Image (cartoon, rainbow, N blue to C red):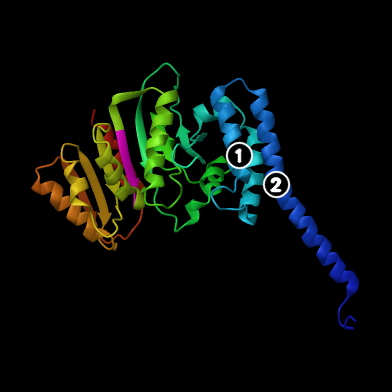
């Protein structure tokens, strides 16, 4: 028997509101996926076709352990809005700092993975361009959900694109890297599979290959570069976050590469950066470094630009 203070009509109304809200959330993902499949069928551009198919797959993918949540659903509706406005047009990706999404099945574990490619403004499939590959920092686990990186830069209001993406003067690659996995194990393999997949579709100038990263991506830069030193023209680490400290065996493999390093005086990762700096200096390495006074663990725009200008000077 119901208590007298429960208003049954109001309770029923609340249940209907919640039910309709769930349906609305489901419709956001479903509508995005349906629209992406439609766009994929309509285009003859292979990059756009893969882009739309990648969005459709990862919008609802659960193979990496993440079921779409309410935030994902809301962002999916914004991505759909972007695609219906100008996100389906090739010129958008040529003129704006908007990434094309590329995906492939990993040979390591058979799962689909993806990465961004931001094109230079004068992009031509037959032209060779510099390559900038950036390794993202840790999002405290938020980047583990593939939809986080997938949806942010594909909304009407652009989000999450770092400095090189706005320059539009090179091929810019930004791997998901399986999220916040420190570019180790499967995440390490992921980066090399991204590079392999990228090389199949794009021409990049072998004399202008630049690898860099912030925080987790800074430490990841040293790790990935130590496994492929012959690939890179120059590398950079912005506030590299080492766990627990730099590996001297990895650093030894980098002593013939130009390296740029910056970190904040007040950040807890400064000790590891100093160890790496001292190692490079002791080996008479070509290193440019700076400790920014009064600054903690922050990715400052001014220093992003300095880093990119420094990398660009090497070829």
Q: Residue at x 27, y 36 (%)?
A: 228
Question: Which residue is nearer to you in this view: 179 or 62?
Answer: 62
Question: Which residue is nearer to you in this view: 74 or 220?
Answer: 220
Q: How crowded is the residue under tag 1: few (<14 C-alpha within 10 Å), some, or many (20+)?
A: some
Answer whether residue 211 is magenta in the image. yes
Task: Kindly indicate the quadrant of the structure image that contains residue 259.
Answer: top left
In the current view of this chain or complex, which residue is farthest to the top? 126
Say whether disc 2 or disc 1 marks the residue closer to the N-terminus.
Answer: 2
The residue tagged 1 is 57
What quarter of the picture does the N terminus occupy? bottom right
Magenta-drawn stretch, dominant element (helix, strand or loop): strand
Position in image of residue 212 (x %, y %): 32, 42
Check contact, mark 2 vs mark 1: CB within 8 A. no
Position in image of residue 186 (x %, y %): 41, 46
Q: Residue at x 37, y 51 (%)?
A: 182
Query: In the shown orientation, is residue 83 left or right of residue 175?
Result: right
Q: Is 153 drawn above or below residue 291 in the view shown?
A: above
Q: Is residue 167 visible?
A: no
Position in image of residue 233 (x %, y %): 25, 32
Question: Which residue is nearer to you in this view: 304 or 76?
Answer: 76
Specify the segment rendered in magenta.
210-215
Query: In the shown orientation, is residue 180 left or right of residue 240?
Result: right
Q: Look at the numbered disc 2 and give the secondary structure of its residue.
A: helix
Q: Look at the numbered disc 1 and give the secondary structure of its residue.
A: helix
Q: CA distance from mark 2 to mark 1?
A: 14 Å
Give me the disc on residue 28: 2
Task: Kindly indicate the quadrant of the structure image that contains residue 304.
Answer: top left
Q: Is residue 19 visible?
A: yes
């Amino acid at each position: 028997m119901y208590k007298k203070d429960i208003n049954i009509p109001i309770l029923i109304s609340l249940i209907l509101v919640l039910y309709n809200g769930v349906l609305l959330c489901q419709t956001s993902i479903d509508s995005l996926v349906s629209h992406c499949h439609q766009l994929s069928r309509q285009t003859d551009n292979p990059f756009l076709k893969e882009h739309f198919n990648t969005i459709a797959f990862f919008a609802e993918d659960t193979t990496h352990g993440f079921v779409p949540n309410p935030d994902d659903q809301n962002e999916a509706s914004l991505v759909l809005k972007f695609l219906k406005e100008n996100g389906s047009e090739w010129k958008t990706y040529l003129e704006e700092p908007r990434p094309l999404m590329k995906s492939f099945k990993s040979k390591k574990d058979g799962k689909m993975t993806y990465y961004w490619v931001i094109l230079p403004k004068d992009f031509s499939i037959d032209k060779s361009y510099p390559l900038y590959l950036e390794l993202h920092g840790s999002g405290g686990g938020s980047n583990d959900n593939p939809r986080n990186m997938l949806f942010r830069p594909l909304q009407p209001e652009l989000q999450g694109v770092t400095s090189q993406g706005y320059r539009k003067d090179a091929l810019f690659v930004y791997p998901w890297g399986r999220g916040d996995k420190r570019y180790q194990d499967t995440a390490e393999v992921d980066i090399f599979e991204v590079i392999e997949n990228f090389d199949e579709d794009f021409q990049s100038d072998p004399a202008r290959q630049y690898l860099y990263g912030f925080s987790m991506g800074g430490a990841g830069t040293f790790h990935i570069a130590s496994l492929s030193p012959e690939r890179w023209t120059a590398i950079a680490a912005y506030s590299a976050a080492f766990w627990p400290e730099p590996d001297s065996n990895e650093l030894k493999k980098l002593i013939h590469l130009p390296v740029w390093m910056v970190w904040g005086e007040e950040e807890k990762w400064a000790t590891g950066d100093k160890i790496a700096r001292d190692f490079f200096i002791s080996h008479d390495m070509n290193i440019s470094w700076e400790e920014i006074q009064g600054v903690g663990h922050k990715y400052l725009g001014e220093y992003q630009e300095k880093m990119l200008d420094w990398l660009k000077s090497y070829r």
